[in-house]
Amino acid sequence: MAKIAIDVITRQGPTVLLEQLADRLGFVRTSVRLYAALISRIADQEPVECGPTYGELLSIQLDELRRLELLCEAIAGLGVDPLEVVPADNLEALAVLEIVMDPQVSLPQALQAILNIEITNNNSWRMLISLAQATGHRELAVRIYETLRDEDRHLARMRSWSIQEPRLPAPRLDLEPLAAS
């Protein structure tokens, strides 16, 4: 079954790769907007002890802008004008953008929503590496792998900010009476 899937991808490689690059382009475009919303949100607040700083978020947003450049170059490398590619907006990322922009959502809740997007984003870059390799675009796979290292750092940062959210202590359960019954 896996061999059949690889054969199909290899035969339809440029088309499948182009579709996935366009999908990534749409996702990253929304991600840039997502970090802009988060930056504007924390710019008006007092710094949060365990949360992101303005500079950290700006750094991530600039990384995302570099992803747009990489994706446009990759699309052009397939012989397609990146300006003619109309990527679909990622609905999940757009939903998170609305969450981040909602003033009733707390910063820890917004960070948790972005963490979920970063997990999806990270997995999508991994799949794109595999697809680029399977279709014979080794140089692109290497460039995407370099991007993945940055994405791994973004994910780690987002996890640390989300984990730092103050939490209630875990309830202590006395299971002895249940074991005796």
Image (cartoon, rainbow, N blue to C red):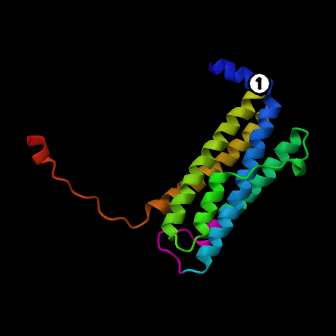
Give how far across and how far down residue 118 sits, in percent: 59, 53
Principal secondary structure, stretch drawn in magenta: loop
Residue drawn 69% across the image and 46% down it? 146
Percent position of residue 73, x then y: 84, 47
Quadrant of image for the C terminus: top left
Q: Is residue 55 visible?
A: no
Circle 1 residue: 10
Where residue 174 sits in the image (x, y, percent)? Answer: 15, 52
Left/right placement of residue 159 relative to residue 59 reads: left
In the rendered image of this protein, does residue 177 appear above or below residue 64?
above
Q: Residue at x 65, y 64 (%)?
A: 35
Q: Bounds of the magenta span?
A: 46-58
Quadrant in which residue 130 is drawn: top right
In front here: 95 or 77? 95
Type of the residue with mark 1: Thr
Task: Look at the numbered disc 1 and give the secondary structure of its residue.
Answer: helix
Name which quarter of the figure residue 66 lies in. bottom right
**Residue at 13% from the left image edge and 45% from the top image edge:** 178
Assess disc 1: are there few (<14), some (14-19) or many (≥20) residues with their C-alpha within 10 Å of its C-alpha.
some
In this view, the residue in front, 139 or 77, is 77
Image quarter hosting the N terminus? top right
Judge left or right: residue 120 versus residue 84. left
x and y, in percent, of residue 24 in the image: 72, 47
Query: Residue 71: in sight, yes or no?
Result: yes
Query: Residue 55 colored magenta?
Result: yes
- Residue 25's place in the image compared with 37, above or below, is above
Q: Is residue 84 above or below residue 127?
A: below
Count of number-bearing discs: 1
Q: Is residue 80 above or below residue 169?
A: above
Residue name at image x 51 percent, y 60 percent? 112
**Residue 68 falls within the magenta-colored stretch:** no
From the viewer's perspective, tell me whether residue 83 is left or right of residue 132. right
